[in-house]
Amino acid sequence: MELKADKTRLFDFYDFQLKHFPQEDALADKINGKWEIHSTQEVIDTANALSTGLLEKGIKPGDKIAIISNNRSEWVMTDLAILQIGAINVPVYPTISDDDYAFIFNDSEVKIVFVSHEELLVKARLAKEKSPSVEEIFTFENIEGAKSWKELLSEKADLEKIQSLRDKVKAEDLATIIYTSGTTGTPKGVMLSHKNVASNTIASKKRLPVDTNAKGVSFLPLCHIYERMIIYLYTYTGVSLYFAESMETIGDDIRDVKPQVFTAVPRLLEKVYDKIIDKGAALTGIKKALFFWAVRLGEKFEPYGANGPIYEIKLKIARKLIFSKWQEALGGNVRAVASGSAALNPRLARIFNAANIPVLEGYGLTETSPVISVNEIDNNGMKFGTTGRPIDDVHVKIAEDGEILVKGPNVMMGYYKRQDLTDEVIKDGWFHTGDIGELENGEYLKITDRKKEIFKTSGGKYIAPQLMENKFKESRFIEQIMVIGEYQKHPSALIVPTFAFLNEWCTRKGIDCSSIEKMLSNEKVLDRFQKELDHYNAPFGKWEQIKKFELLPEEFTVGNNMVTPTLKLKRKVILAKYEALIEEIYC
Protein backbone atom coordinates (compact mmCIF):
# COMPACT_ATOMS: atom_id res chain seq x y z
CA MET A 1 0.00 0.00 0.00
CA GLU A 2 1.35 3.42 -0.93
CA LEU A 3 2.34 5.66 1.97
CA LYS A 4 0.72 9.08 2.02
CA ALA A 5 1.44 12.19 4.02
CA ASP A 6 -1.38 12.68 6.49
CA LYS A 7 -1.14 16.48 6.59
CA THR A 8 -0.83 19.15 3.99
CA ARG A 9 1.66 21.60 5.48
CA LEU A 10 5.05 21.75 3.81
CA PHE A 11 7.08 21.00 6.92
CA ASP A 12 5.12 17.76 7.40
CA PHE A 13 7.09 16.19 4.52
CA TYR A 14 10.25 16.17 6.63
CA ASP A 15 8.51 14.37 9.50
CA PHE A 16 7.13 11.93 6.94
CA GLN A 17 10.60 11.16 5.62
CA LEU A 18 12.04 10.74 9.11
CA LYS A 19 9.28 8.33 10.08
CA HIS A 20 9.18 6.17 6.96
CA PHE A 21 12.59 6.34 5.23
CA PRO A 22 15.20 8.42 7.07
CA GLN A 23 18.18 9.12 4.82
CA GLU A 24 21.84 9.36 5.75
CA ASP A 25 22.32 11.61 2.73
CA ALA A 26 19.03 13.49 2.69
CA LEU A 27 20.95 16.55 1.51
CA ALA A 28 24.47 16.91 0.14
CA ASP A 29 26.68 19.80 -0.98
CA LYS A 30 29.86 19.61 -3.02
CA ILE A 31 32.43 21.79 -1.29
CA ASN A 32 36.01 22.00 -2.53
CA GLY A 33 35.50 18.87 -4.59
CA LYS A 34 34.04 16.73 -1.78
CA TRP A 35 30.45 15.89 -0.91
CA GLU A 36 29.29 16.90 2.57
CA ILE A 37 26.11 15.06 3.54
CA HIS A 38 23.33 15.77 6.01
CA SER A 39 20.94 13.13 7.35
CA THR A 40 17.19 13.63 7.65
CA GLN A 41 17.59 13.93 11.42
CA GLU A 42 20.35 16.52 11.05
CA VAL A 43 18.21 18.61 8.68
CA ILE A 44 15.35 18.62 11.18
CA ASP A 45 17.62 19.31 14.18
CA THR A 46 19.31 22.24 12.41
CA ALA A 47 15.94 23.68 11.39
CA ASN A 48 14.70 23.42 14.98
CA ALA A 49 17.82 25.24 16.23
CA LEU A 50 17.29 27.97 13.63
CA SER A 51 13.56 28.26 14.38
CA THR A 52 14.44 28.86 18.03
CA GLY A 53 16.98 31.50 17.05
CA LEU A 54 14.41 33.29 14.88
CA LEU A 55 11.90 33.26 17.72
CA GLU A 56 14.53 34.73 20.03
CA LYS A 57 14.97 37.52 17.45
CA GLY A 58 11.29 38.30 17.83
CA ILE A 59 10.04 36.68 14.61
CA LYS A 60 6.32 35.91 14.85
CA PRO A 61 3.85 33.97 12.67
CA GLY A 62 3.16 35.95 9.52
CA ASP A 63 6.51 37.75 9.50
CA LYS A 64 8.41 37.73 6.20
CA ILE A 65 11.95 36.37 5.81
CA ALA A 66 13.87 36.53 2.53
CA ILE A 67 16.38 33.99 1.20
CA ILE A 68 18.79 35.06 -1.55
CA SER A 69 21.11 32.19 -2.29
CA ASN A 70 22.50 29.63 -4.65
CA ASN A 71 21.20 26.07 -4.21
CA ARG A 72 22.56 24.55 -1.00
CA SER A 73 21.47 22.61 2.08
CA GLU A 74 21.23 25.79 4.17
CA TRP A 75 18.45 27.00 1.85
CA VAL A 76 16.35 23.93 2.63
CA MET A 77 17.04 24.02 6.37
CA THR A 78 16.18 27.72 6.53
CA ASP A 79 12.99 27.19 4.57
CA LEU A 80 11.90 24.50 7.03
CA ALA A 81 12.81 26.69 10.00
CA ILE A 82 10.74 29.58 8.65
CA LEU A 83 7.66 27.60 7.70
CA GLN A 84 7.26 25.54 10.86
CA ILE A 85 6.91 28.63 13.07
CA GLY A 86 4.27 30.13 10.79
CA ALA A 87 6.53 32.74 9.19
CA ILE A 88 6.56 33.43 5.43
CA ASN A 89 9.45 32.56 3.11
CA VAL A 90 10.12 35.22 0.45
CA PRO A 91 12.70 33.69 -1.93
CA VAL A 92 14.51 36.15 -4.17
CA TYR A 93 16.38 35.58 -7.43
CA PRO A 94 20.12 36.18 -6.82
CA THR A 95 20.57 37.62 -10.31
CA ILE A 96 18.23 40.62 -10.07
CA SER A 97 19.37 44.13 -9.12
CA ASP A 98 19.60 45.64 -5.64
CA ASP A 99 16.74 47.97 -6.65
CA ASP A 100 14.60 44.89 -7.29
CA TYR A 101 15.70 43.53 -3.90
CA ALA A 102 14.57 46.79 -2.30
CA PHE A 103 11.20 46.66 -4.05
CA ILE A 104 10.57 43.10 -2.83
CA PHE A 105 11.80 43.86 0.71
CA ASN A 106 9.51 46.89 0.95
CA ASP A 107 6.49 45.37 -0.76
CA SER A 108 6.50 42.26 1.45
CA GLU A 109 7.91 44.03 4.55
CA VAL A 110 10.78 41.59 5.00
CA LYS A 111 12.32 41.58 8.50
CA ILE A 112 15.33 39.27 8.13
CA VAL A 113 17.38 38.42 5.04
CA PHE A 114 19.58 35.37 4.46
CA VAL A 115 22.20 35.49 1.69
CA SER A 116 24.75 32.91 0.63
CA HIS A 117 27.89 34.78 -0.43
CA GLU A 118 29.63 38.15 -0.48
CA GLU A 119 28.39 39.45 -3.83
CA LEU A 120 24.79 38.98 -2.71
CA LEU A 121 25.58 40.49 0.68
CA VAL A 122 26.73 43.70 -1.02
CA LYS A 123 23.48 43.93 -3.00
CA ALA A 124 21.35 43.07 0.03
CA ARG A 125 23.06 45.78 2.12
CA LEU A 126 22.38 48.36 -0.61
CA ALA A 127 18.74 47.27 -0.67
CA LYS A 128 18.53 47.39 3.15
CA GLU A 129 19.39 51.10 3.06
CA LYS A 130 16.15 51.64 1.13
CA SER A 131 14.10 49.13 3.14
CA PRO A 132 13.21 50.22 6.68
CA SER A 133 11.53 46.91 7.54
CA VAL A 134 14.77 44.91 7.19
CA GLU A 135 16.37 44.44 10.61
CA GLU A 136 19.30 42.13 9.96
CA ILE A 137 21.15 40.23 7.23
CA PHE A 138 22.75 36.84 7.85
CA THR A 139 25.11 34.90 5.58
CA PHE A 140 25.47 31.18 4.91
CA GLU A 141 29.16 31.53 4.08
CA ASN A 142 31.66 32.91 6.59
CA ILE A 143 32.29 36.53 5.55
CA GLU A 144 34.38 38.95 7.56
CA GLY A 145 32.27 41.72 9.02
CA ALA A 146 29.00 39.89 8.38
CA LYS A 147 26.67 37.99 10.69
CA SER A 148 26.76 34.24 10.10
CA TRP A 149 23.52 32.28 10.10
CA LYS A 150 25.21 30.03 12.66
CA GLU A 151 24.78 32.83 15.20
CA LEU A 152 21.06 32.09 15.06
CA LEU A 153 21.42 28.36 15.74
CA SER A 154 20.31 27.94 19.34
CA GLU A 155 22.27 25.42 21.40
CA LYS A 156 19.01 24.12 22.86
CA ALA A 157 16.03 24.11 20.55
CA ASP A 158 12.72 25.12 22.12
CA LEU A 159 10.82 22.10 20.82
CA GLU A 160 7.75 22.83 22.94
CA LYS A 161 7.37 26.33 21.52
CA ILE A 162 8.03 25.14 17.98
CA GLN A 163 5.42 22.38 18.27
CA SER A 164 2.90 24.85 19.64
CA LEU A 165 3.42 27.09 16.61
CA ARG A 166 3.36 24.14 14.18
CA ASP A 167 0.01 23.07 15.57
CA LYS A 168 -1.45 26.50 14.79
CA VAL A 169 -0.37 26.47 11.12
CA LYS A 170 -3.26 25.51 8.84
CA ALA A 171 -2.96 24.07 5.35
CA GLU A 172 -4.74 27.13 3.99
CA ASP A 173 -2.25 29.55 5.56
CA LEU A 174 0.17 31.57 3.45
CA ALA A 175 3.54 29.79 3.18
CA THR A 176 5.46 31.83 0.63
CA ILE A 177 5.38 34.93 -1.54
CA ILE A 178 7.23 34.44 -4.82
CA TYR A 179 7.86 37.50 -6.91
CA THR A 180 7.56 36.58 -10.56
CA SER A 181 10.51 37.68 -12.64
CA GLY A 182 8.21 38.70 -15.45
CA THR A 183 9.15 39.63 -19.00
CA THR A 184 7.91 43.19 -18.45
CA GLY A 185 6.81 45.48 -15.66
CA THR A 186 7.05 45.42 -11.87
CA PRO A 187 7.32 42.00 -10.17
CA LYS A 188 4.09 40.62 -8.70
CA GLY A 189 4.09 38.72 -5.42
CA VAL A 190 2.38 35.37 -5.91
CA MET A 191 0.88 34.12 -2.63
CA LEU A 192 0.99 30.34 -2.23
CA SER A 193 -0.42 28.49 0.74
CA HIS A 194 0.91 25.29 2.28
CA LYS A 195 -2.00 23.48 0.64
CA ASN A 196 -1.27 24.97 -2.79
CA VAL A 197 2.26 23.59 -2.91
CA ALA A 198 1.70 20.44 -0.83
CA SER A 199 -1.23 19.31 -2.98
CA ASN A 200 0.91 19.82 -6.06
CA THR A 201 3.74 17.82 -4.49
CA ILE A 202 1.50 14.89 -3.60
CA ALA A 203 -0.21 14.83 -7.01
CA SER A 204 3.13 15.05 -8.86
CA LYS A 205 4.51 12.02 -7.00
CA LYS A 206 2.57 9.69 -9.29
CA ARG A 207 4.47 11.05 -12.31
CA LEU A 208 7.94 10.54 -10.76
CA PRO A 209 9.27 7.05 -11.65
CA VAL A 210 11.74 6.78 -8.74
CA ASP A 211 11.70 5.58 -5.14
CA THR A 212 13.56 5.91 -1.85
CA ASN A 213 16.73 4.35 -3.28
CA ALA A 214 17.16 7.18 -5.78
CA LYS A 215 19.40 10.23 -5.94
CA GLY A 216 18.58 13.59 -7.47
CA VAL A 217 20.78 16.50 -8.52
CA SER A 218 19.59 20.09 -8.12
CA PHE A 219 20.92 23.12 -9.97
CA LEU A 220 17.90 25.12 -11.17
CA PRO A 221 17.13 28.10 -8.89
CA LEU A 222 15.41 27.12 -5.63
CA CYS A 223 13.80 30.56 -5.54
CA HIS A 224 11.60 29.40 -8.42
CA ILE A 225 8.59 27.30 -7.41
CA TYR A 226 9.44 24.66 -10.05
CA GLU A 227 12.66 23.50 -8.40
CA ARG A 228 11.35 24.21 -4.92
CA MET A 229 8.31 21.97 -5.33
CA ILE A 230 10.62 19.27 -6.68
CA ILE A 231 12.67 19.53 -3.46
CA TYR A 232 9.51 18.87 -1.42
CA LEU A 233 8.72 16.02 -3.79
CA TYR A 234 12.15 14.48 -3.24
CA THR A 235 11.66 14.81 0.51
CA TYR A 236 8.21 13.19 0.33
CA THR A 237 9.52 10.37 -1.87
CA GLY A 238 12.77 9.80 0.02
CA VAL A 239 15.07 10.80 -2.83
CA SER A 240 18.54 11.88 -1.65
CA LEU A 241 19.23 15.39 -2.91
CA TYR A 242 22.66 16.51 -4.12
CA PHE A 243 23.27 20.19 -4.88
CA ALA A 244 25.61 20.85 -7.80
CA GLU A 245 28.70 22.84 -6.92
CA SER A 246 28.09 25.43 -9.65
CA MET A 247 26.55 25.87 -13.09
CA GLU A 248 29.99 25.26 -14.57
CA THR A 249 30.40 21.87 -12.86
CA ILE A 250 26.95 20.41 -13.58
CA GLY A 251 28.24 17.80 -16.01
CA ASP A 252 30.94 16.58 -13.64
CA ASP A 253 28.56 16.60 -10.67
CA ILE A 254 25.96 14.54 -12.53
CA ARG A 255 28.56 11.99 -13.57
CA ASP A 256 29.81 11.88 -9.98
CA VAL A 257 26.40 11.42 -8.30
CA LYS A 258 24.94 9.15 -11.02
CA PRO A 259 21.40 10.39 -10.29
CA GLN A 260 18.16 8.69 -11.18
CA VAL A 261 16.39 12.04 -11.55
CA PHE A 262 17.01 15.73 -12.08
CA THR A 263 15.18 18.75 -13.46
CA ALA A 264 16.15 20.78 -16.50
CA VAL A 265 14.99 23.55 -18.76
CA PRO A 266 14.92 23.11 -22.55
CA ARG A 267 17.83 25.53 -22.94
CA LEU A 268 20.07 23.20 -20.94
CA LEU A 269 18.93 20.12 -22.85
CA GLU A 270 19.63 21.95 -26.12
CA LYS A 271 23.19 22.64 -24.97
CA VAL A 272 23.71 19.02 -23.86
CA TYR A 273 22.43 17.81 -27.23
CA ASP A 274 24.65 20.24 -29.16
CA LYS A 275 27.73 19.02 -27.30
CA ILE A 276 26.85 15.41 -28.05
CA ILE A 277 26.32 16.20 -31.74
CA ASP A 278 29.63 18.08 -31.88
CA LYS A 279 31.42 15.00 -30.56
CA GLY A 280 29.64 12.85 -33.12
CA ALA A 281 30.65 15.21 -35.92
CA ALA A 282 34.28 14.84 -34.88
CA LEU A 283 34.17 11.07 -35.45
CA THR A 284 35.28 9.51 -38.71
CA GLY A 285 34.42 6.52 -40.86
CA ILE A 286 32.04 3.83 -39.63
CA LYS A 287 31.84 5.34 -36.12
CA LYS A 288 30.52 8.63 -37.51
CA ALA A 289 28.10 6.82 -39.83
CA LEU A 290 26.72 4.74 -36.94
CA PHE A 291 26.41 7.81 -34.72
CA PHE A 292 24.25 9.76 -37.15
CA TRP A 293 22.28 6.64 -38.11
CA ALA A 294 21.30 6.40 -34.42
CA VAL A 295 20.39 10.09 -34.31
CA ARG A 296 18.15 9.78 -37.39
CA LEU A 297 16.55 6.70 -35.84
CA GLY A 298 15.95 8.64 -32.62
CA GLU A 299 14.22 11.45 -34.49
CA LYS A 300 11.48 8.97 -35.46
CA PHE A 301 11.03 7.51 -31.97
CA GLU A 302 7.53 6.80 -30.67
CA PRO A 303 6.89 5.34 -27.21
CA TYR A 304 5.27 2.01 -26.38
CA GLY A 305 6.65 0.24 -29.45
CA ALA A 306 4.36 2.17 -31.79
CA ASN A 307 6.88 2.01 -34.66
CA GLY A 308 6.71 -1.77 -34.80
CA PRO A 309 9.13 -4.66 -34.10
CA ILE A 310 11.69 -3.89 -36.85
CA TYR A 311 12.18 -0.36 -35.53
CA GLU A 312 12.50 -1.71 -31.98
CA ILE A 313 15.26 -4.10 -33.08
CA LYS A 314 17.16 -1.23 -34.70
CA LEU A 315 16.62 0.89 -31.59
CA LYS A 316 18.04 -1.86 -29.39
CA ILE A 317 21.19 -1.90 -31.52
CA ALA A 318 21.44 1.90 -31.45
CA ARG A 319 21.07 1.96 -27.68
CA LYS A 320 23.82 -0.61 -27.23
CA LEU A 321 26.31 0.89 -29.68
CA ILE A 322 25.66 4.63 -29.47
CA PHE A 323 23.10 5.77 -26.94
CA SER A 324 24.71 3.89 -24.04
CA LYS A 325 27.52 6.46 -24.22
CA TRP A 326 24.98 9.29 -23.95
CA GLN A 327 23.62 7.66 -20.81
CA GLU A 328 27.11 7.35 -19.34
CA ALA A 329 27.63 11.08 -19.84
CA LEU A 330 24.69 11.61 -17.46
CA GLY A 331 25.88 9.07 -14.92
CA GLY A 332 24.29 5.99 -16.46
CA ASN A 333 21.29 5.75 -14.08
CA VAL A 334 18.87 8.44 -15.27
CA ARG A 335 15.24 7.34 -15.11
CA ALA A 336 13.61 10.76 -15.43
CA VAL A 337 14.54 14.28 -16.47
CA ALA A 338 11.69 16.67 -15.66
CA SER A 339 11.69 19.48 -18.22
CA GLY A 340 9.78 22.68 -17.61
CA SER A 341 9.78 26.50 -17.71
CA ALA A 342 9.54 26.67 -21.52
CA ALA A 343 8.46 24.59 -24.50
CA LEU A 344 10.66 21.61 -25.30
CA ASN A 345 11.37 20.89 -28.95
CA PRO A 346 9.58 17.58 -29.74
CA ARG A 347 12.57 16.44 -31.80
CA LEU A 348 14.80 16.66 -28.74
CA ALA A 349 12.23 14.84 -26.62
CA ARG A 350 12.13 11.99 -29.14
CA ILE A 351 15.91 11.65 -29.38
CA PHE A 352 16.55 11.69 -25.63
CA ASN A 353 13.79 9.17 -25.01
CA ALA A 354 15.11 7.01 -27.83
CA ALA A 355 18.47 7.14 -26.05
CA ASN A 356 16.73 5.73 -22.96
CA ILE A 357 17.04 9.05 -21.18
CA PRO A 358 13.37 9.73 -20.33
CA VAL A 359 12.73 13.46 -20.66
CA LEU A 360 9.29 14.24 -19.26
CA GLU A 361 7.97 17.62 -20.34
CA GLY A 362 5.58 19.41 -18.02
CA TYR A 363 3.73 22.70 -17.85
CA GLY A 364 2.87 25.08 -15.08
CA LEU A 365 3.21 28.57 -13.68
CA THR A 366 4.24 30.12 -10.38
CA GLU A 367 0.55 30.88 -9.87
CA THR A 368 -0.27 27.15 -10.07
CA SER A 369 2.37 25.93 -7.60
CA PRO A 370 3.51 25.08 -10.38
CA VAL A 371 2.53 21.82 -12.12
CA ILE A 372 -0.61 21.70 -14.24
CA SER A 373 0.30 18.78 -16.48
CA VAL A 374 3.29 16.53 -17.11
CA ASN A 375 4.14 13.55 -19.25
CA GLU A 376 4.64 10.18 -17.57
CA ILE A 377 6.21 6.94 -18.68
CA ASP A 378 3.37 4.66 -17.55
CA ASN A 379 -0.33 4.61 -18.44
CA ASN A 380 0.29 5.70 -22.06
CA GLY A 381 1.07 9.07 -20.55
CA MET A 382 3.83 10.09 -22.97
CA LYS A 383 2.85 12.15 -26.00
CA PHE A 384 5.55 14.21 -27.72
CA GLY A 385 4.70 17.80 -28.53
CA THR A 386 2.41 17.98 -25.50
CA THR A 387 2.91 18.50 -21.78
CA GLY A 388 0.98 15.36 -20.92
CA ARG A 389 -2.22 14.93 -18.98
CA PRO A 390 -3.24 17.25 -16.12
CA ILE A 391 -2.26 15.91 -12.69
CA ASP A 392 -4.87 14.68 -10.19
CA ASP A 393 -7.43 17.24 -8.95
CA VAL A 394 -6.24 19.87 -11.46
CA HIS A 395 -8.87 20.69 -14.05
CA VAL A 396 -8.12 22.28 -17.42
CA LYS A 397 -10.41 23.75 -20.04
CA ILE A 398 -9.79 25.78 -23.17
CA ALA A 399 -11.59 29.11 -23.51
CA GLU A 400 -13.21 30.19 -26.76
CA ASP A 401 -10.16 32.28 -27.65
CA GLY A 402 -7.85 29.32 -27.00
CA GLU A 403 -6.60 30.44 -23.57
CA ILE A 404 -5.82 27.68 -21.06
CA LEU A 405 -7.93 27.94 -17.89
CA VAL A 406 -7.09 26.02 -14.71
CA LYS A 407 -8.94 25.18 -11.51
CA GLY A 408 -7.64 23.16 -8.57
CA PRO A 409 -6.08 23.18 -5.08
CA ASN A 410 -2.80 24.37 -6.62
CA VAL A 411 -4.15 27.74 -7.82
CA MET A 412 -2.62 30.62 -5.87
CA MET A 413 -4.29 32.60 -3.11
CA GLY A 414 -3.74 35.72 -5.21
CA TYR A 415 -1.22 38.50 -5.83
CA TYR A 416 0.11 40.12 -2.66
CA LYS A 417 -1.57 43.49 -2.02
CA ARG A 418 -2.96 43.43 -5.59
CA GLN A 419 -6.57 42.31 -5.50
CA ASP A 420 -7.11 44.18 -8.78
CA LEU A 421 -4.57 41.99 -10.59
CA THR A 422 -5.91 38.88 -8.87
CA ASP A 423 -9.42 39.62 -10.14
CA GLU A 424 -8.07 39.97 -13.68
CA VAL A 425 -6.74 36.39 -13.77
CA ILE A 426 -9.06 34.43 -11.44
CA LYS A 427 -12.66 34.50 -12.62
CA ASP A 428 -15.37 32.17 -11.33
CA GLY A 429 -12.67 30.06 -9.73
CA TRP A 430 -10.76 29.56 -13.00
CA PHE A 431 -7.21 30.85 -13.32
CA HIS A 432 -6.51 32.39 -16.72
CA THR A 433 -2.95 31.35 -17.59
CA GLY A 434 -2.31 33.73 -20.47
CA ASP A 435 -1.15 30.75 -22.54
CA ILE A 436 -2.82 29.46 -25.67
CA GLY A 437 -3.26 25.73 -26.08
CA GLU A 438 -5.41 22.76 -26.89
CA LEU A 439 -6.22 19.33 -25.48
CA GLU A 440 -5.08 16.71 -27.98
CA ASN A 441 -7.38 13.68 -27.99
CA GLY A 442 -9.25 15.51 -25.25
CA GLU A 443 -6.58 14.74 -22.63
CA TYR A 444 -2.98 15.76 -23.54
CA LEU A 445 -2.33 19.46 -23.04
CA LYS A 446 -0.44 21.19 -25.83
CA ILE A 447 0.86 24.75 -25.44
CA THR A 448 1.04 26.76 -28.64
CA ASP A 449 1.98 30.27 -27.46
CA ARG A 450 1.64 33.08 -24.96
CA LYS A 451 -1.58 34.98 -25.50
CA LYS A 452 0.17 38.34 -25.10
CA GLU A 453 2.99 37.40 -27.48
CA ILE A 454 0.84 36.46 -30.47
CA PHE A 455 0.84 39.39 -32.88
CA LYS A 456 -0.72 40.49 -36.15
CA THR A 457 1.04 41.47 -39.34
CA SER A 458 -0.14 44.54 -41.26
CA GLY A 459 -2.16 42.15 -43.39
CA GLY A 460 -4.15 41.05 -40.34
CA LYS A 461 -2.59 37.57 -40.12
CA TYR A 462 -1.85 36.16 -36.67
CA ILE A 463 1.70 35.00 -35.87
CA ALA A 464 2.49 32.67 -32.94
CA PRO A 465 6.20 33.36 -32.36
CA GLN A 466 7.01 30.69 -29.75
CA LEU A 467 5.76 27.88 -31.97
CA MET A 468 7.95 29.12 -34.81
CA GLU A 469 10.99 29.78 -32.64
CA ASN A 470 10.88 26.27 -31.23
CA LYS A 471 10.94 24.87 -34.77
CA PHE A 472 13.80 27.05 -36.00
CA LYS A 473 15.94 26.12 -33.00
CA GLU A 474 16.14 22.60 -34.41
CA SER A 475 18.89 24.02 -36.63
CA ARG A 476 22.39 23.40 -35.33
CA PHE A 477 23.29 26.89 -36.53
CA ILE A 478 20.64 28.65 -34.39
CA GLU A 479 21.19 29.03 -30.65
CA GLN A 480 18.42 31.56 -29.99
CA ILE A 481 15.85 33.29 -32.14
CA MET A 482 13.13 35.89 -31.71
CA VAL A 483 10.43 36.24 -34.35
CA ILE A 484 9.35 39.86 -34.91
CA GLY A 485 7.01 41.71 -37.24
CA GLU A 486 4.01 43.10 -35.37
CA TYR A 487 2.02 45.33 -37.77
CA GLN A 488 4.69 44.81 -40.44
CA LYS A 489 4.20 43.26 -43.89
CA HIS A 490 5.89 40.01 -42.91
CA PRO A 491 7.66 38.26 -40.00
CA SER A 492 11.43 38.58 -39.62
CA ALA A 493 13.87 37.19 -37.08
CA LEU A 494 16.69 38.23 -34.79
CA ILE A 495 19.04 35.24 -34.61
CA VAL A 496 21.81 34.39 -32.18
CA PRO A 497 24.03 31.80 -33.90
CA THR A 498 25.43 28.75 -32.16
CA PHE A 499 28.87 30.34 -32.13
CA ALA A 500 30.90 27.22 -31.33
CA PHE A 501 29.31 25.29 -34.19
CA LEU A 502 29.46 28.26 -36.58
CA ASN A 503 33.15 28.76 -35.79
CA GLU A 504 33.85 25.07 -36.53
CA TRP A 505 31.81 25.26 -39.77
CA CYS A 506 33.66 28.40 -40.91
CA THR A 507 37.01 26.74 -40.20
CA ARG A 508 36.03 23.77 -42.37
CA LYS A 509 34.89 26.10 -45.16
CA GLY A 510 38.01 28.28 -45.02
CA ILE A 511 36.06 31.32 -43.87
CA ASP A 512 37.78 33.95 -41.73
CA CYS A 513 36.55 33.39 -38.17
CA SER A 514 39.11 35.57 -36.37
CA SER A 515 36.23 37.69 -35.03
CA ILE A 516 32.47 37.35 -34.61
CA GLU A 517 31.92 40.43 -36.75
CA LYS A 518 33.80 38.94 -39.71
CA MET A 519 31.88 35.67 -39.46
CA LEU A 520 28.47 37.29 -39.25
CA SER A 521 29.09 39.58 -42.23
CA ASN A 522 30.49 36.88 -44.50
CA GLU A 523 28.28 36.23 -47.53
CA LYS A 524 28.76 32.45 -47.33
CA VAL A 525 27.60 32.50 -43.71
CA LEU A 526 24.57 34.61 -44.57
CA ASP A 527 23.71 32.27 -47.44
CA ARG A 528 23.98 29.26 -45.12
CA PHE A 529 21.59 30.82 -42.62
CA GLN A 530 19.18 31.62 -45.45
CA LYS A 531 19.21 27.93 -46.40
CA GLU A 532 18.42 27.03 -42.78
CA LEU A 533 15.50 29.46 -42.76
CA ASP A 534 14.20 28.17 -46.09
CA HIS A 535 14.26 24.62 -44.72
CA TYR A 536 12.49 25.37 -41.43
CA ASN A 537 10.05 27.82 -43.03
CA ALA A 538 8.56 25.00 -45.08
CA PRO A 539 5.91 23.73 -42.58
CA PHE A 540 4.46 27.21 -42.05
CA GLY A 541 1.92 29.14 -44.09
CA LYS A 542 3.23 31.76 -46.53
CA TRP A 543 2.10 34.60 -44.25
CA GLU A 544 4.03 33.05 -41.32
CA GLN A 545 7.34 32.42 -43.06
CA ILE A 546 10.33 34.51 -42.04
CA LYS A 547 11.36 36.72 -44.95
CA LYS A 548 14.36 38.57 -43.49
CA PHE A 549 16.77 38.07 -40.62
CA GLU A 550 19.68 39.65 -38.78
CA LEU A 551 22.47 37.79 -36.96
CA LEU A 552 23.29 39.12 -33.51
CA PRO A 553 26.79 39.12 -31.99
CA GLU A 554 25.76 38.27 -28.41
CA GLU A 555 23.49 35.80 -26.65
CA PHE A 556 20.29 36.72 -24.84
CA THR A 557 21.26 36.22 -21.19
CA VAL A 558 20.13 37.09 -17.68
CA GLY A 559 23.28 39.20 -17.36
CA ASN A 560 22.36 41.52 -20.25
CA ASN A 561 18.71 41.59 -19.12
CA MET A 562 17.35 40.04 -22.31
CA VAL A 563 15.96 36.90 -20.66
CA THR A 564 14.30 36.31 -17.31
CA PRO A 565 15.95 34.15 -14.63
CA THR A 566 13.88 31.26 -16.04
CA LEU A 567 15.34 31.99 -19.50
CA LYS A 568 12.22 33.37 -21.15
CA LEU A 569 12.80 36.10 -23.75
CA LYS A 570 12.19 39.66 -22.57
CA ARG A 571 10.72 40.65 -25.90
CA LYS A 572 10.17 44.34 -25.16
CA VAL A 573 13.73 44.71 -23.90
CA ILE A 574 15.13 43.00 -27.00
CA LEU A 575 12.94 45.07 -29.32
CA ALA A 576 14.13 48.27 -27.63
CA LYS A 577 17.80 47.30 -27.75
CA TYR A 578 17.71 46.43 -31.45
CA GLU A 579 15.23 49.09 -32.52
CA ALA A 580 17.59 50.61 -35.11
CA LEU A 581 18.42 47.20 -36.57
CA ILE A 582 14.73 46.32 -36.83
CA GLU A 583 14.06 49.58 -38.63
CA GLU A 584 16.71 48.60 -41.19
CA ILE A 585 14.98 45.24 -41.71
CA TYR A 586 11.68 46.90 -42.55
CA CYS A 587 12.89 50.07 -44.29
Image (spheres, rainbow, N blue to C red):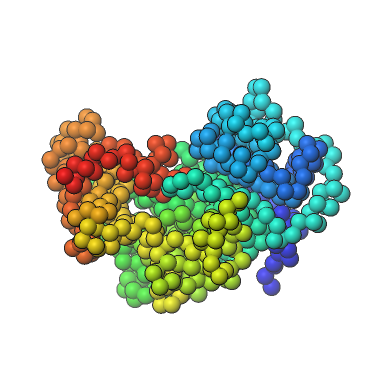
Q: Residue at x 74, y 50 (%)?
A: 86
Asked which quadrant contains residue 118, the reply is top right
- Asked whether the viewer can see residue 573, the reply is yes
Furthest-right residue in view?
160
Q: Residue 209: image x %, image y %?
A: 55, 64
Q: Residue 48: image x %, image y %?
A: 78, 45
Furthest-top residue in view?
145
Locate the N terminus by quadrant. bottom right
In this picture, residue 451 sits left or right of residue 212: left
Locate the C terminus by quadrant. top left
In this picture, residue 576 sits left or right of residue 389: left
- Asked whether the viewer can see residue 290, the reply is no
Furthest-front residue in view?
420
In this picture, residue 464 sits left or right of residue 122: left
Q: Residue at x 24, y 62 (%)?
A: 460
Q: Residue 532: image x %, image y %?
A: 20, 52
Q: Is residue 397 above or below residue 575?
A: below
Asked which quadrant contains residue 260, the reply is bottom right
